[in-house]
């Protein structure tokens, strides 16, 4: 079966820096794939080329066999490549449920309005999504009143409202405590698993990555240096080298 996403010899430089240097990998349907690597490895540059925000110098990106290189972010989004965790500037001034309803309206291509039968229909669906992320009880609170971890849950509901085939999550748990990180990633994994959505995510906590990723790819200085499951990545000398210098292991370096 064709992979959902294929990245082929992707490259992008900034001045003399080869931020992404001939990277190739694929994501299967329903796969939960972690992209890891030290700061400056090129992870965000990869994400930004896949979602169309940044032009590639060379290489190709195929979604379900069709090239998406050169398409505008909006067009890539319409083809089912969703992005968390990027909320609208207006998030705080609407209620939680209104924010999810707007995403549902926008997905359905309907005009923004909060009255009439359309709004009611989306309200039920929005409530259902909020229940799935554990936010039903806070549906009518203003976005600005939410705790940080709760904002992340609503962002997830918004991302799911767009019914993506592939969800790109660049540091979704940034700023969260370890326990919260683990919970959010576990929740994402469960909800995308139920829907058959593929995910590409970055995450700094190795514990979280090793606990949840189906597969892990590792970038260092713009190059892909490893691709495999948690067991093989943990044991990979090249990976240990870039993370901790020679002779150290993930186990010993755990926080
Ligand atoms: P990561 O997300 O893995 O931390 P990035 O993709 O953000 O890494 O960055 C990879 C390299 O490209 C770094 O050396 C970074 O300084 C450089 N870089 C990223 N974006 C830009 C930019 N817009 N302009 C100049 N250099 C950039
Ligand atoms: Mg980054």
Image (cartoon, grey):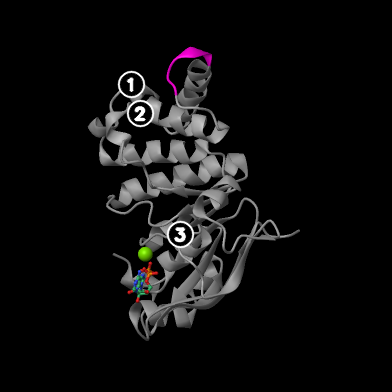
Residue lying furthest left in this view? Answer: 145
Q: Could you tell whether 198 is left or right of 91 in the image?
A: right
Q: Which mark is residue 96?
A: 2
Q: Which mark is residue 18?
A: none
**What is the C-alpha distance between the residues marked 1 and 2?**
6 Å
Q: Is residue 120 visible?
A: yes
Name the residue beneath numbered marker 1: 140
Q: Which residues are magenta?
A: 113-117
Nearest the camera: 171 or 107? 107
Q: Is residue 25 above or below residue 236?
A: above
Nearest the camera: 162 or 132? 162
Q: Is residue 8 visible?
A: no
Q: Position of residue 7 (x, y in %)?
A: 60, 68
Magenta stretch, overall SS: loop
Nearer the observer: mark 1 or 3; the answer is: 3
Q: Which sits earlier in the primary sequence, circle 1 or circle 3? A: 3
């Amino acid at each position: 079966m064709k992979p959902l996403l294929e990245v082929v010899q992707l490259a992008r430089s900034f001045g003399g820096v080869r931020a992404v240097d001939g990277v190739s990998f694929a994501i299967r349907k329903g796969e939960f794939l972690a992209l890891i690597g030290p700061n400056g490895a090129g992870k965000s540059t990869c994400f930004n080329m896949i979602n169309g925000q940044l032009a590639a110098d060379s290489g190709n990106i195929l979604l379900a066999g069709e090239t998406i290189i050169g398409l505008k972010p909006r067009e890539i989004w319409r083809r089912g490549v969703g992005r968390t965790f990027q909320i609208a500037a207006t998030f705080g001034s609407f209620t939680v449920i209104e924010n999810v309803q707007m995403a549902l309206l926008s997905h359905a291509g309907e005009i923004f309005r909060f009255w009439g039968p359309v709004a009611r229909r989306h309200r039920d669906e929005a409530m259902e999504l909020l229940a799935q992320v554990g936010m039903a009880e806070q549906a009518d609170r203003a976005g600005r009143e939410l705790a940080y971890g709760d904002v992340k849950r609503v962002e997830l509901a918004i991302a799911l409202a767009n019914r993506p085939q592939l969800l790109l999550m660049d540091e979704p748990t940034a700023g969260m405590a370890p326990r919260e990180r683990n919970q959010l990633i576990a929740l994402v994994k469960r909800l995308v698993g139920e829907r058959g959505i593929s995910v590409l995510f970055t995450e700094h906590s190795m514990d979280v990555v090793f606990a949840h990723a189906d597969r892990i790819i590792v970038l260092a200085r713009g190059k892909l240096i490893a691709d495999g499951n948690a067991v093989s990545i943990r044991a990979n000398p090249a990976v240990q080298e870039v993370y901790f210098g020679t002779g150290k292991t993930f186990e010993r370096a755990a926080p």
